[in-house]
Image (tube, rainbow, N blue to C red):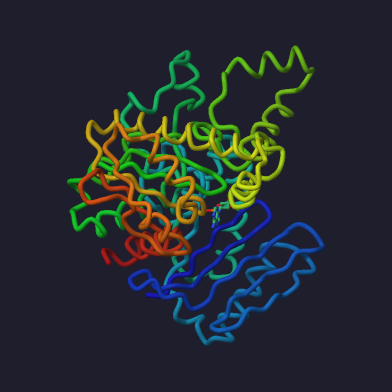
Amino acid sequence: MWTLVVNCGSSSVKFALLRPTSGEVRLSGLAERLGSEAAAVRVDRPGERVTVPLPRGSYPEAFGVLLAELDRLGARRDVGAVGHRVVHGGARFSAPALITPEVLEVIRACVPLAPLHNPANVAGIEAARAAFPDLPHVAVFDTAFHQTMPEVAYRYAVPPAWYHEHGVRRYGFHGISHAFVAGEAARLLGRDLSELHLVTAHLGNGCSVTAIAGGRSVDTSMGLTPLEGLVMGTRSGDVDPGLHDYLAREAGLSLGEITADLNRHSGLLGLSGLTNDMRELEAAAAAGDERARLAVEIFVYRLAKTVAGMAVALGRLDALVFTGGIGENSATVRAATLARLELLGFRPDAAANARAVRGQGGRITLPEGTPALVVNTNEERMIARETQRLVVGDL
Ligand code: AMP
């Protein structure tokens, strides 16, 4: 079955038409700068890339271009379902859901938990349902995979009313990616996922680490929001919760300003004062830039500490999996992380690590130690799979 996967951000729509079983992609594209006059959609047709301007800059206009492209390919009739990435499903969704008016209401009810993401997801779903009124639409949640976390992992040590009345707990994100790479890692290892204890490190612009026991998330580094945990491109990750009060008094900053700084001007960008791009930081560090070197070192140190912490959640570690733009491409970050994790039994294979870049995954440790693997994530394919599974039963 051909499945259309749609991923709506606050000013963008990413889409792909693919077959979940084989991973074959027939059409893909990205609409960007929606809401502005500069909006345009880039369409990757078979063997060709075109850019179509979107003068109204709206979601319906972007879906109009998508429909025209499907017609051009004669593919509209082949689309069997639409799968939507939805960032926050709160505690209500532990699995993908067929989108009904009731489900859409629950996604709307999760807006306070993800004020930047869920409104865009809702708007995208509405535009897609208008464009494809006869197809089943499925919501696949970034939080759902982590709903298996035990209470010991998801509760914060805060007043109980915050939890019971306001849902203040850890939810975790990147679940679609963590679940996908765990399955791929099991295949690479030639083992059954149900018998493996894995730590997966999704390292992109956002970064998180998940402990996965028998295919189920048992702990993860992101929490109530995607700001908790590791150092990221522009996000701080963990800071002292006393920081807000201190900065409000000392620097006269508002809560909104502090939150914006923690989300947009911190992480690798904040530490280096240069960029959030790991490639550029590695080049700057190699050229002698001390702030870039320190930014990468702090990124790696916090990552290694978190991976070691996740080993506690698992009791035993069968493999560490690197994925995301940094995890899949930065041999430097992987080598430095493994060097800090000798206590977990990794024996790095420098040549294999250097080879594992640009889509070339595989094992980057020697046979005698704990395996570390590089696995390319494919969230679109995971969303397509989950969508097909829900619509027509098992694959
Ligand atoms: P993502 O959000 O998964 O697309 O990942 C984006 C991050 O991956 C950025 O920090 C990029 O600098 C980083 N990245 C992509 N390619 C490389 C590379 N060859 N070496 C180091 N980092 C890379």
Q: Residue at x 25, y 54 (%)?
A: 186
Q: Residue at x 26, y 64 (%)?
A: 394
Q: Residue at x 67, y 30 (%)?
A: 259
As displayed, is residue 287 above or below residue 131? above
Q: Nearer the viewer, residue 71 or 53?
A: 53
Q: Nearer the viewer, residue 94 or 49?
A: 49
Quadrant where the N terminus is found in the figure: bottom left
Q: Quadrant of residue 276?
A: top right
Q: Position of residue 112 (x, y in %)?
A: 59, 35
Quadrant where the C terminus is found in the figure: bottom left
As displayed, is residue 112 above or below residue 62? above
As displayed, is residue 46 above or below residue 230? below
Q: Nearer the viewer, residue 265 or 361?
A: 361
Left/right placement of residue 259 relative to residue 229 reads right
Q: Residue at x 67, y 14 (%)?
A: 245
Q: Position of residue 7 (x, y in %)?
A: 55, 58
Q: Quadrant of residue 206?
A: top right
Q: Position of residue 53 (x, y in %)?
A: 75, 72
Q: Position of residue 183 (x, y in %)?
A: 29, 55
Q: Nearer the viewer, residue 393 or 24?
A: 24
